[in-house]
Image: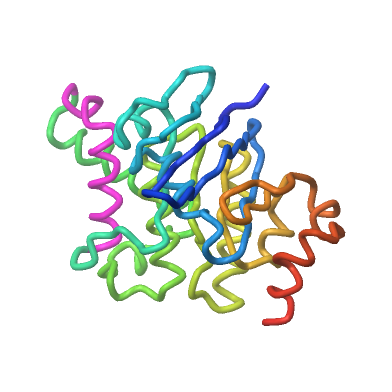
Amino acid sequence: MSLFSAKGLIKNFHSLRATDNVSIDVNPNEVHALIGPNGAGKSTLVNLISGLLPVDAGTITLDGRNITGLKAHERVHAGLSRCFQVTNLFKDISVMDNLRLAVQAHDGNNFKVFGIRNNERLLNDKARELGAKVGLESDEVLNSIAGSLPHGAQRQLDIALALAANPKVLLLDEPMAGMGQDESARVVEMIKGLRQHMAILLIEHDMEAVFQLADRISVLVYGKVITTGTVDQIRNDPKVQEVYLGSETSHG
């Protein structure tokens, strides 16, 4: 049974149908990638799933619960966390302080029963544990100002902040955007580790990363899912080659 399911999602902007009866599901501990050319409707779909846009029709369920009518923050509490294309950090404070704030925001009630000293130690331990999940565990990095980090490390921190909510499903919106080869490779390894603890819906243009990570891939074109399949099925699908992969591989 699917952990996450979107069925028949429709979104219209005046006369434009941005998502046209889109259905997609994610199984436990699965990486399900969503790919498609620019203008395919991926951003609209992500906003529908995360609750930033209301659906015109269709349903969204998470772990058997209908979350279609929930606001974005309510979906986070239900177990759906999202990382945006643009990092969402407090760039003028340290990495450690970013992690502390994230832990407090999602686990605040647990700190009220402790004394100040124990509270601080527990908070620091949880913040470090969160950083370690994404490869940001050294004191040098933790004490760095978040905005001074390389782009790849900022993305890793952004994912850590989403993980603070202990999601059942993590929605990653182009996590490799703007990265070099080495940075992308680090994020790929990080995602491989995260999948042991949660399901991941991955929206990504880096097809090398998609083919390394995905259990299944859905292809979105002009607001419709034209096919869903395994890596081999998608890689060898003539229709997908025609509308997307051919143009992607030609750009390197």
Quadrant where the N terminus sits is top right
Nearer the observer, 159 or 38 = 38
Q: Is residue 61 magenta?
A: no
What's the coloring here?
Answer: rainbow
Reply above or below: 87 against 230: below
Nearer the observer, 55 or 121 = 55
- Residue at x-position 28% and y-position 32%: 107
Return the x and y of residue 172 as percentages of the image width and height.
50, 51
Return the x and y of residue 148 as percentages of the image width and height.
30, 75
- Quarter-of-image position of residue 241: bottom right
Reply above or below: 236 against 125: below
Q: Main secondary structure of the magenta part?
A: helix
Q: Which residues are magenta?
A: 94-113
- Quarter-of-image position of residue 125: top left
Going by the picture, which residue comes out furthest to the left? 116
- Residue at x-position 39% and y-position 46%: 162
206 left or right, relative to 63: right
